[in-house]
């Protein structure tokens, strides 16, 4: 094998290891393999990093932009307190208050005191929830509607007067809800106090019935 010597290339030249069979013009490509930076580039980069670090410290963040622990804890506590205050305000706003005359009527309906107490527990949840509970607790077992001309039995169940009359007409003399024996001669009396309460809470519910 025959070798060629390139006499003008020194041992320190990066192309000295290149075979002489290469075109010597390739040596001009070697400088292009290394990154070229403008004058003052590195100094400008350092100044930029310092400015970024100062800005992060002034905003209460670390180098990665994450909030500092102390300020994070304070922020979380503030958010929790704010949320609790908002919830408290909402609860105060939706609480349903009974009118004094209605409160008096409800108090007078002592035979249904347990049912009314269950309804009152829903007052903090608003008017709609309170009325829904009233409709559930004073539902007639026969027609499955809010009791109309309510008859409150000895066993403390509320039945519509027409429903109870139909039951007795069919010779069934027991409570439709629990089968308590009312007796054939049971005197059906409308609970006027309860009727007035229901009309005040749900005006017109008895229309057409």
Image (spheres, rainbow, N blue to C red):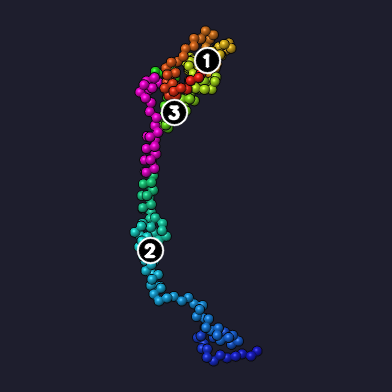
Residue located 51% across and 88% down the image: 10
The image shows residue 72 at horizontal and vertical percentages of: 38, 52
Residue assigned mark 3 = 130
Residue located 60% across and 87% down the image: 21
Quarter of the figure that contains the N terminus: bottom right
- Specify the label residue 52 is tagged with: 2
Residue assigned mark 1 = 162
Q: Secondary structure at mark 2?
A: helix
Task: Please say if the residues under marks 3 and 1 sit with CB atoms less than 8 Å apart.
Answer: no
The Cα atoms of the two marked residues, 2 and 1, are separated by: 83 Å
Q: Is residue 63 above or below residue 200?
A: below
The image shows residue 36 at horizontal and vertical percentages of: 46, 76
The residue mark sitting in front, 2 or 1, is 1
Residue located 57% across and 91% down the image: 5
Q: Is residue 40 visible?
A: yes
The residue mark sitting in front, 3 or 1, is 1
Instruction: Write down the region rendered in magenta.
Output: 81-107
- Specify the label residue 12 is tagged with: none
In the picture, measured across the screen, residue 7 lies left or right of residue 108, that is right
The image shows residue 93 at horizontal and vertical percentages of: 38, 34
Mark 2 crowd level (few <14, some 14–19, many ≥20, 10 Å Cα): few
Closer to the chain start, of discs 2 and 1, is 2
Mark 3 crowd level (few <14, some 14–19, many ≥20, 10 Å Cα): many
Total number of numbered labels? 3
């Amino acid at each position: 094998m025959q070798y060629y010597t390139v006499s003008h290339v020194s041992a320190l030249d990066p192309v000295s290891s290149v075979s002489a069979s290469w075109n010597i013009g390739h040596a001009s490509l070697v400088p292009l393999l290394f990154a070229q930076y403008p004058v003052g580039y590195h100094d400008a980069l350092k100044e930029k990093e310092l400015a970024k670090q100062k800005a992060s410290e002034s905003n209460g963040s670390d180098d990665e932009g994450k909030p500092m622990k102390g300020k994070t804890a304070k922020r979380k506590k503030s958010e929790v307190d704010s949320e609790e205050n908002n919830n408290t305000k909402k609860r105060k706003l939706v609480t349903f208050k009974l009118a004094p005359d209605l409160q008096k009527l409800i108090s007078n309906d002592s035979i249904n005191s347990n049912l009314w107490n269950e309804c009152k527990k829903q007052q903090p949840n608003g008017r709609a929830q309170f009325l829904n509970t009233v409709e559930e607790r004073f539902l007639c077992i026969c027609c499955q509607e809010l009791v109309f001309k309510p008859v409150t039995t000895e066993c403390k169940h509320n039945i519509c007067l027409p429903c109870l009359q139909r039951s007795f007409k069919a010779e069934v003399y027991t409570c439709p809800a629990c089968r308590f024996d009312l007796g054939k001669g049971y005197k059906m009396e409308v609970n006027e106090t309860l009727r007035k309460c229901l009309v005040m809470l749900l005006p017109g519910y008895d229309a057409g019935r």
